[in-house]
Structures are given as C-alpha cells and as structure tokens.
C-alpha cells in the first residue's frame, strides 16, 4: 500500500503480507483496506497502521465512519470494528443491499431481503448495534434510501403486485 499525506508530506510505502483491494478513505483521511486473507487495516495518512482486525469472511461494503470505526458486511451480518476490536455484530435474516446509509449519529439504515425475497424491509441499527425499527411489507419492496439534512428519511419502493407502480415514504427520524 502506498500513499502520501494530504498536506504534501513524504510519500510512504507500507508492506503488507498479502495482496489487497482498493482502500476506502474515511472522513479523517485514514485508509481502510482488506487483504485476501481477510485482514482489515486502518492506516493513517502518514502510512502508520492504526489497527488490524481479522474478519470472519471477505468483508463487503467497507464503510469508514466519522468516529474512525469501520462498518462492513459479511453475508447476512453487519459488523462494527473499533480500534481493531469487534464492537458489535448485527445478524440479519437475508442479505443487504449495497444501498445503505449512515447518519451523523452513525445510525445505519439498510435494505434487507431486497433480492427477490417475498418480504423486504428497511432496518435501522443504532451506533451501539441495537435494532431500532423496521419498515416494509409484502405489498411493496424498498428500492432506494436517502437522508436529508433536516432529519427526514425517504424510502422509495415498488408496489409488489407487478403493475409497475412506485411509492415514496417520508419519515421523521
């Protein structure tokens, strides 16, 4: 892994023992990267490893958080890592869509059961890993999520009867 500090500092090179993917860069400039051996690293802009964590699988959807923690999915589960230690694991019933959101309080909003499932819904997971709520039904399938700065949360979805109709829901979190 190679990099250079944002302020134009010295270029650096960090040797890793296995091939790795493209890093995700967090709000604080730290890079989060995973090797093919399932080891996740947090590396600061000066090239120093802040922590490492061995994931239970090849992690998907790496999402650095403003706090410096890392959120990712493995199969049906969300994981949150803090300072190289598992902070929490939230187990779902089915897989999650790539379209998930994280608000300023680091609450996670994700679509579950989105891929041809009979029932799909949106879930909210607190920054502490607790299930807050779920929204959805057999009559419509969530397709998109977005947050607005004023605190409103929107979900778009397709009516499940197949006539092509869509619905939009607005929630005040």
Image (tube, helix red, strand yellow):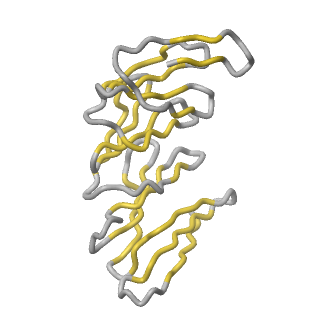
Q: Give coordinates of residue 42: x percent, y percent.
A: 48, 23
Residue at image location 28% in from the left, 70% down from the top? 117
- Report x, y in % for residue 142: 43, 70
Depth order, front residue of 33/53: 33
Q: Quadrant of residue 95?
A: bottom left
Residue at 44% across, 11% down: 15
Query: Furthest-right residue in view?
Result: 7
- Looking at the image, which residue is at 30% across and 72% down? 119
Instruction: Pick the quarter of the image with the C terminus.
Output: bottom right
Of 40 and 2, nearer the camera is: 2
Residue under the image location 42 percent in, 83 percent down: 159
Above or below: residue 141 compared with residue 112:
below
How many numbered discs sit on the rendered protein? Answer: 0
Q: Going by the image, does 24 lie left or right of 121?
A: right
Q: Is residue 13 left or right of residue 11?
A: left
Q: Which of 8 and 136 lies nearest the eye of the viewer? A: 8
In the picture, residue 7 is in which quadrant?
Answer: top right
Up-down: is 148 above or below 3? below
């Amino acid at each position: 892994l190679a990099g250079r500090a944002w302020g134009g500092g010295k270029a650096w090179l960090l040797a890793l023992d296995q091939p790795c993917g493209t890093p995700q860069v967090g709000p604080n400039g730290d890079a989060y990267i995973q090797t093919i051996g399932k080891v996740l690293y947090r590396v600061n802009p000066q090239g120093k490893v802040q922590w490492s964590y061995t994931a239970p699988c090849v992690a998907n959807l790496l999402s650095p958080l403003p706090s410096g923690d890392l959120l990712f999915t493995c199969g049906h589960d969300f994981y949150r890592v803090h300072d190289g230690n598992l902070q929490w694991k939230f187990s779902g019933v089915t897989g999650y869509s790539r379209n998930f959101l994280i608000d300023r309080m680091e609450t996670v909003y994700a679509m579950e059961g989105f891929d041809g499932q009979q029932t799909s819904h949106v879930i909210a997971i607190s920054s502490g890993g607790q299930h807050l709520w779920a929204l959805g039904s057999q009559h419509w399938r969530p397709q998109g999520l977005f947050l607005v700065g004023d605190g409103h949360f929107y979900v778009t979805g397709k009516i499940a009867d197949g006539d092509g109709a869509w619905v939009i829901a607005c929630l005040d979190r």
